[in-house]
Image: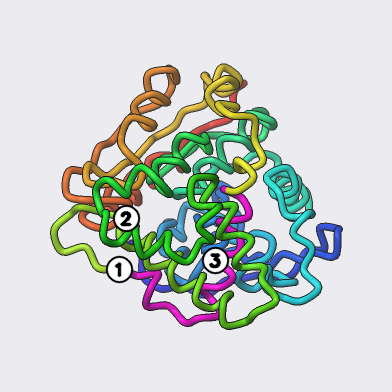
Amino acid sequence: MYPPIEPYDRGHLDVGDGHSIYWETVGSPAGTPVVWLHGGPGAPASPGSRRYFDPSRYRAVIFDQRGCGRSRPLATDPDADLSTNTTDHLVGDLERLRVHLGIDRWVVVGGSWGVTLGLVYAERHPERVLGMVLVAVTSGRWRETQWITRDMGRVFPREWDRFVELVPEAERAGDLAAAYARLLASPDPALREEAARRWCAWEDTHMSLAPGYTPHLSVRELPWQQVFARLVTHYWGHGCFLADNEVMANLHRIAHIPAVLIHGRHDVSGPLDTAWELHKAWPASRLVVVDDAGHFGGSMDDEFVAAIDAMSSVQPPS
């Protein structure tokens, strides 16, 4: 990764519905435009996000999606309206931000949930995308959420039992993400706090089978956990606000766009088959499997930065 860097510009953009999103730009104002889409939903960008981009080659746009980080209101604010926080809204925010910054086309870079968001954005606005670099590949399908919230209980039964025991017994056979979303919206602050802790503990459990993996969600401060858990369960409990298999069904719209897909061999929460399926259906894509990484870690950052570096020379079609 590149050395720490400070933004040369930043601000808040009013995107409507009472939302204001935080954005910043780093690197060279004359560089190739690139936008970073963070994961979660609800795991905002950090100063470390700036370090993926060569400041001599890129004009990197980094922002916090609705409801998290430095954007306002936060998903946990009493007056937050989650009905205006959907995938459609986030795609619209991306376009507003692009226009606001005077960018015609940009490279789209995303991780985890940011992969799904980036793919949906590219499929709806292919003429605005120069290329894509996508790490910890997801596609927003119901089966991926089901795998994480229920099927992984077969791998981690003790931890899954603790994850599920907070859910009312009558709801345990249903949509667990939606059940947790209801817990996180409870009027009881103690229940909201415990739900956030248990959600983050469960995600840390299944994130990686790689040796040396260190949990990172369950050790975050409680307000961060509450925002993260509220948003991720809101999205997953609504099927990511996508028709199931929507990304795969519309992949032909971006078949010509160059892309690098990067995925960890030990990513048990997001099995490699999603990245493999995308790659097989995407003629202009290249798949990199990182043998010492899970959802992150190992040499993942090295592969990620190398792929982003290589994408900086991509040219728009004539």
Q: Distance between the residues labelled 2 and 3?
A: 15 Å
Asked if residue 292 lies left or right of residue 167, the reply is left
Q: Residue 228 carries which label?
A: 3
Figure coloring: rainbow
Question: On screen, 26 above or below 93?
Answer: below
Q: Looking at the image, which residue is at 26% across and 54% down?
A: 156
Q: Would you call the spot at circle 2 few (<14 residues within 10 Å), some (14-19), or many (20 or more)?
A: many
**What amino acid is found at the position of numbered circle 3 in the picture?**
Phe
Residue type marked 2 = Met
Is the residue marked by circle 1 packed among few (<14), some (14-19), or many (20+) residues within 10 Å?
A: some
Q: In which quadrant is the N terminus drawn?
A: bottom left
Q: Residues within 10 Å of mark 3 (few under 14, many from 20)?
A: many
Q: Is mark 1 on a helix, strand or loop?
A: loop
- Where residue 198 appears, as percent x and y from the top left, is 43, 69
Dot 3: what SS? helix
Q: Does the magenta stretch include residue 196?
A: no
For the point 60% across and 71% down, which residue is it? 69
Q: Residue 215 carries which label?
A: 1
Residue carrying label 2: 207
Main SS class of the magenta portion in the image? helix
**Could you tell me if the residues under marks 1 and 3 are in contact, i.e. CB atoms within 8 Å?**
no
Q: Residue furthest front?
A: 170
Dot 2: what SS? loop
